[in-house]
Amino acid sequence: MNQEIRLLLAITLMMLVLITTNILFAPSTPETPPPAATDSMNSQQNPSEDIETASGTTPNGKTYDAEPVNKDDLQQRMQQDENLRDRVAEEIVVEGEQYRLTFNSHGARLTSAQLLKFQSFSHEGPVEFFPEGGDGALGSEIRTERENLNFRSFPFEVVPQEGINLTESDQPQTLTFTYKHPSGAFALQKSYTFTPLSYEIEARVEVDGIGRSLLVTDMGTGLAFNEAQEAEELRIMGYVTNHLREGIQAKPMRKVKEDLTIEGPLIWSALKSKYFLLAILPGTGNDQEQYLGGLLVSPVPGDHQAKVAVTQPLGAGGSVSYRLFVGPQERDLLMAYSNGLEEANPYGYRWMRVVVRPVVVIVMAVLNFLHLNLSVGYGWVLIIFGVMMRVLLFPLNQKAMKAQMRNMAVQPLLQEIQKNHKDNPEKLQKEMMKLYKEHGFNPLAGCLPMLLPWPVLITLFFVFQNTIQLRGESFLWLPNLSAADPLYILPVILGASMFLMQWISVKSMPDPNPQMKMMLWIMPIMMAVIFANFASGLNLYYATANIATLPQQYWIAKERQKFRAQSAPKIQANSG
């Protein structure tokens, strides 16, 4: 049973308790576009243009012939220099305060991306983006009208060869990879620019001697697992696109069973895990680079992986830019792009987001405010927030309980009306409406105010699912507030607090029925079992809120008994 089903079950049980308590005093749930030709993915720049070779000038000022190069001739040229092909691959490292990136000189590929500030929970060391033994990302392929040129394994010259080491005060620095064929027929240059304290990499690709073509850039085969519970992370692993017209669409890697071609224009494309994101966005250059061309997806051997690549038209100029984001899913960080990137891994189900999104904004603002201004960890923040919620909702809970008191007090009169007019439905309805009006009876009045905490509880469930700020936050015996309590102490406290709340409520009722007495014991046990595998931070908040409610619950129970004692003579007099 996954966590979403557990949450729905918990909500159903809580609804049952609330509604049952009040009824006691009443009278009676995008398809992927079809494959299309790859060369059509540059339609957002000029839909009438096809990929072709044409006369023109390269970025280096070299004029190339309009005559198309023969496919066999090009492949022979690329295979001529065996010494160059057999050169030993070199690893070039770019390291800053936030990341350690490793490139391979063969293909100018990014083979390792580690986020130094985030610990992996599936292996020793920091978070790693790429699965072990994979090809990484940023491998390049050039597609012309006549052929495909694969540069993923060809050796590139690297400048600076020793790599780059960035400090916080450094200016942006560029790592350049260049492949030049000995014959001078063609060349490919890839430049990556890194900025200190930024998870964004600016990339530029320049092609010389090939003509108008399509650049295919590998995104990889999916992100590596970095969480303790692989099953929960597996459900989220996938690719996401933001289409200019069709909006955001996502698909889990495990569901890729055949080759797919997603035509653009795309605002961005991303690979996601539970807390991390690898995204390719258009460059910040001219208007022709404001969108990506499209996406190529194909299954690969192995479990839960798929090969994903982005296309971009190089055009007559032979160059194109893009940006690569390799970092955490920090909502504020992603919202700065102003292109919906924060919705790559959205909060809640699609049908819930209308309610969940605004509540997320409010809840996260409060949690971050308390964390920053009180200088305490998120564990204490959740405790403070749980108490605050109960204090703020005290008037509404008090109103709900008073409505229940009125319903309880009117119960004998309702029973008498039902008895006297059981054979006359019209008269029964008339007398009941009169009673409702005179005594302010409303069977749902005690239930509706108590539903208000639920959007917060549901929102916190999804917040703990993919909010990076809470990942790895420890508190007392809890090593990670975003993971389940390893000792199951909090679920027990949660169940005990629910039992006490119900016990106080049931004891104040005049004659609780057998079903209510049974739920007094069964409900807390079921809720403890359901919440046992939820994030310990969610359990911490919920248990705190319950415990903070106990004094109020006791006081209201006393008021309920007092109200019933005072109302009994009046009701008897009215009935007489």
Image (tube, rainbow, N blue to C red):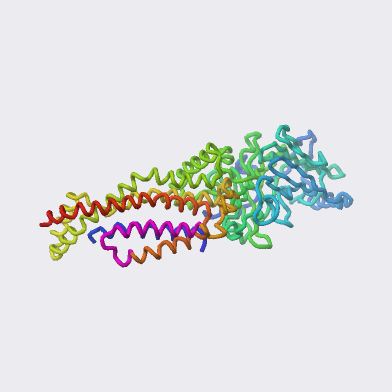
Given residues 502 and 459, the one toward you in this image is 502
Q: Give the range drawn in magenta.
A: 490-516
Horizontally, is 532 left or right of 180 in the view? left
Given residues 58 and 513, the one toward you in this image is 513
Horizontally, is 149 left or right of 559 in the view? right
- Please state the horizontal and vertical placement of residue 451, each as a whole percent of the image: 37, 51
- Please state the horizontal and vertical placement of residue 59, each as a whole percent of the image: 76, 35
- Please state the horizontal and vertical placement of residue 138, each as a whole percent of the image: 71, 47
Q: Is residue 501 magenta?
A: yes
Secondary structure mainly formed by the magenta segment: helix
Confirm whether residue 141 shows in the render.
no
Q: Is residue 137 magenta?
A: no
Horizontally, is 559 left or right of 58 in the view? left
Query: In the picture shown, does residue 108 fall above or below 63?
Result: below
Query: In the picture shown, does residue 515 fall above or below 335?
Result: below
Horizontally, is 271 left or right of 546 in the view? right
